[in-house]
Amino acid sequence: MGNISEREIRKQHMNGIINLKKEAGMTSHDAVFKLRKILGTKKIGHGGTLDPDVVGVLPIAVGKATRMVEFMQDEGKVYEGEITLGYSTTTEDASGEIVAESPILSPLDEKLVDEAIASLTGPITQVPPMYSAVKVNGRKLYEYARAGQEVERPERQVTIYSFERTSPISYEDKLARFTFRVKCSKGTYIRTLSVDLGEKLGYAAHMSHLTRTSAAGLRLEDSLTLEEIAEKVEAGQLDFLHPIEIGIGDLVKVYLTTEQAEEVRFGRFIELEHSEKEVAAFEGEKLLAILEKRENLYKPRKVFS
């Protein structure tokens, strides 16, 4: 067998969640592919796709933590970005070709802008952009778009928890710009939100910049780039792996008794005084399961130990 290096042993026991800062110009898939090489393990998944141009938090699950991916994807996301009014593009962001122009000839009423923003909060319906990875008849929308084909796009329901303007409106070259912050559910297209806001105000618009500042309870200021992770692995430091418990994000924590924990391990329903649709069940400090509400009881949806 020969001697297995300490690093190889560590790689075999690599489990946890990484707060990756995805840089511009790479897809979420590229990031996972590169991390597999850096960490020397195939068992890696990510908690929510980011467009190639977007910088920000890409939650990564490694080893046993990959079972948390679906819950990490369900978590609310927070974005900060910029909207430009005055022209729209094929891709709904700054990378596309100009489709329509509506020059801004006089200053906008900030109160009306903020009212339009407020009207786009709560549950809303979106039509995904043609340049997106949503599948229609087995093909991704961007494949149709690149071939110059328009197809019927399925509407989707998303939730905008908060949407606010974070700067004064600035004017230049018959364009108006302002920054914003939005907290939303999974599946929300911020590009589309920007275009829809422009429509409400009567202008062609696009999203000119975007950063994801938070996802699955992980924050941008604590994130690490691929390069920084590679340096840590090289130095034998695995402190970038967060415990699996961090992946529960906004789920309500419930602490089980020994008897309840035993029932959950056997996949049995238990009674809890809670109203939430899903809860994270803990045994002491360890995450035991995600439970989902079924009438008056809670059923184990996923058991972790």
Image (cartoon, rainbow, N blue to C red):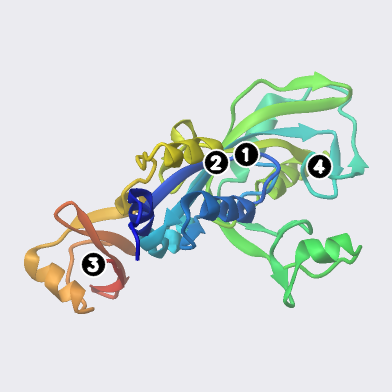
Mark 4 Cα within 10 Å, few/some/many (few <14, many 20+)?
A: some
- Name the quarter where the N terminus is drawn: bottom left
**Viewer-nearest residue: 61 or 174:** 61
Q: Is there a contact, CB below 8 Å, between mark 2 and mark 1?
A: yes
Q: Which mark is residue 95?
A: 4
Q: Which residue lies under the disc numbered 1?
A: 23
Is residue 276 in sight in this rendering?
A: no
First-in-chain label (2 vs 3): 2
Rendering coords of residue 11 (x, y %): 38, 54
Given the image, on which type of amino acid does mark 3 rest? Ser
> Which is nearer the eye, 26 or 114?
26
Distance between the alpha carbons at the discs numbered 4 and 3: 46 Å
Placement of 215 over or under 73, stated as above or below: above
How far apart in space, not on screen, are marks 2 and 4 (Cα)? 24 Å
Quarter of the image where one finds residue 102? top right
CB under 8 Å between discs 4 and 3: no
Q: Position of residue 265 (x, y in %)?
A: 19, 74
Q: What amino acid is at disc 1?
A: Glu
Q: Looking at the image, is mark 4 or mark 3 nearer the viewer?
A: 3
Q: For the residues marked 2 and 1, what is the alpha-carbon distance in whole angstroms?
A: 9 Å
Give residue 187's position: percent from left, percent from top.
59, 57
Q: Which numbered tag is attached to residue 184?
A: none
| Amino acid on which the number 2 mark rests in the picture | Leu
Q: Which residue does the numbered mark 2 point to in the structure image? A: 226
- N-terminal of the pair, mark 1 or mark 3, is 1
Precedes in sequence: disc 4 or disc 1: 1
Residue 305's disc is 3
User: In this rendering, would 299 be left or right of 32?
Assistant: left
